[in-house]
Image: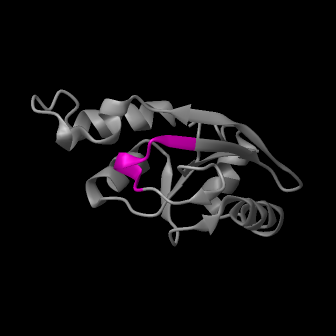
Amino acid sequence: MIQVAYCSTNGLQINSHFATSPSFTIYEIGPEISHLVGKITLAEETQHPEQHVEHIASEDDNVSLRIKALQKCSFVYCSQIGGPAAARLIQSSIYPLKAVDGTSIEETNEKLSQMLKTNPPPWLRKKLQNGKAGNA
């Protein structure tokens, strides 16, 4: 089983930019099943740091906060993500994936489940064999 985060405003569709998503919907997905784990909602100041005069939550801090919140996830799906944030996610063993705005979370879960059943990529297969998927 792996944990997957979705940048979503409604819990049904992938529809947010990674750096400004107000929340992440988390699913646990395996070859035969997927189920909702929960939702991570971020504080208002992390959603729009550019609006704060003092810039208390700098862009780096904002990305660090999000990475820490998603540390158990293997993937994060979003509609958009900047290059530096994507690189930092990968360094933390969380793989960012872009999806067309409005993509169904349920359909994505089904595709991931099928991929886990048939032919997961080598790095993910290794994580699954070591029992570390979802605990990166």
**Is residue 80 among what the camera can see?**
yes
Q: Is residue 55 magenta?
A: no
- Residue at image point 30% right, 36% down: 62
Q: Which residue is nearer to you in this view: 94 or 100?
A: 100
**Is residue 135 among what the camera can see?**
no
- Residue at image point 84% right, 56% down: 31
Give above or below for 125 relative to 22: below
Q: Where is residue 2 drawn, in percent x and y?
A: 70, 45
Give the image quarter of residue 122. bottom right
- Residue at image point 40% right, 51% down: 18
- Residue at image point 28% right, 42% down: 48
Bounds of the magenta segment: 17-24
Q: Is residue 99 left or right of residue 39?
A: left
Q: Is residue 105 left or right of residue 85?
A: right
Residue farthest to the right?
32
Residue farthest to the bottom?
100
